Image: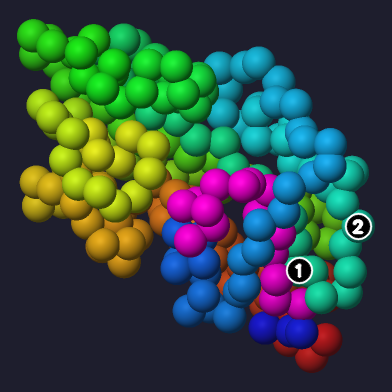
Amino acid sequence: MDEATTILFVTSNQGKITEAKEVLRPYGINVESYVPNPEIDEIQSADLVEVAADKLMKAVSNSTLSSSIFGVMVEDAGFFLDEYEGFPGVYSAYVHKTLGISGVLRSLKGIENRNASFRCVIGIHIEGENFFFEGACKGIVSDKIRGVNGFGYDPLFIPNEGDGRTFAEMKLEEKAIFSHRAKALEAFRSFLDEWKQSPTSNHGNGS
């Protein structure tokens, strides 16, 4: 890549920063936390893409990009329970803060349908353009809290693609194989490989 290899990730969540670093580091991309001042107010919407687009627009308008910054990145993600028609979804952070994962477990006591999914939309601002990438991971909710790694709902979520462990029972590199965030970042990485080759991009060959 060119000299500008740092992406500012608009989040104070160190778990998200660590996961993004893990996925993008092999491609020469450094990820750093960026918290705008004042903090961004998120719009109320059930659409992850709409929330991410609004957040990205506000983040870019509040940031001063130096020549060493490759882009600005935002994310909107949610934990979706099939039994509750996708709830908490975009309200996952609020539910986690108020009920906690123990409260979510209690709400599912005696309920047979424990299917769930993590979904993620990542927005990237590069050279005046906005791009969006989505990732999803399906699984089930465990019958108890398991594991000490990760963050958020990780101790409850058993991915279908895994071996029966929750995300919180996995090492970061194991989770990154099929997590929703890793899939969205991988989609970005694949796009970037093609974008760098485009003759209309400043990052194309010969630039």
Q: Residue at the location (89% across, 69% down)?
A: 66
Question: Can you identify the residue that label 1 sits on?
Answer: 70
Q: Residue at the location (61% across, 74% down)?
A: 29
Specify the quadrant of the image occupied by residue 100: top left
Q: Residue at the location (13% across, 48% down)?
A: 165
What is the total number of numbered labels drawn onto the structure image?
Answer: 2
Quadrant where the N terminus is found in the figure: bottom right
Q: Which residues are magenta?
A: 4-18
Instruction: Give, as a three-letter code, the residue at label 1.
Output: Phe
Measure how far apart labels 1 and 2 are at the Cα level. 12 Å
Q: Position of residue 27 (x, y in %)?
A: 53, 78
Q: Position of residue 73 (x, y in %)?
A: 67, 52
Question: Can you identify the residue that label 2 sits on?
Answer: 64
- Is mark 1 in CB contact (under 8 Å) with mark 2? no
Is 104 drawn above or below residue 50 in the view shown?
Answer: above
Give 105 or 185, whichever is nearer the viewer: 105
Give 107 or 58, whichever is nearer the viewer: 107
Secondary structure beneath dot 2 equals loop
Q: Residues within 10 Å of mark 2 (few under 14, many from 20)?
A: few
Is 85 drawn above or below residue 140 in the view shown?
Answer: above
197 with respect to 169 (left or right): right
Specify the quadrant of the image occupied by residue 6: bottom right
70 with respect to 22 (left or right): right
The coloring applied to the image is: rainbow
Task: Point out the tag, 1 or 2, that comes first from the N-terminus.
Answer: 2
Q: Residue furthest bottom?
A: 206
Secondary structure beneath dot 1 equals strand
Residue 140 shows in the view = no
Residue 106 shows in the view = yes
Residue 15 located within the stretch drawn in magenta: yes
Instruction: Give, as a three-letter code, the residue at label 2.
Output: Thr
Q: Position of residue 50 (x, y in %)?
A: 66, 27
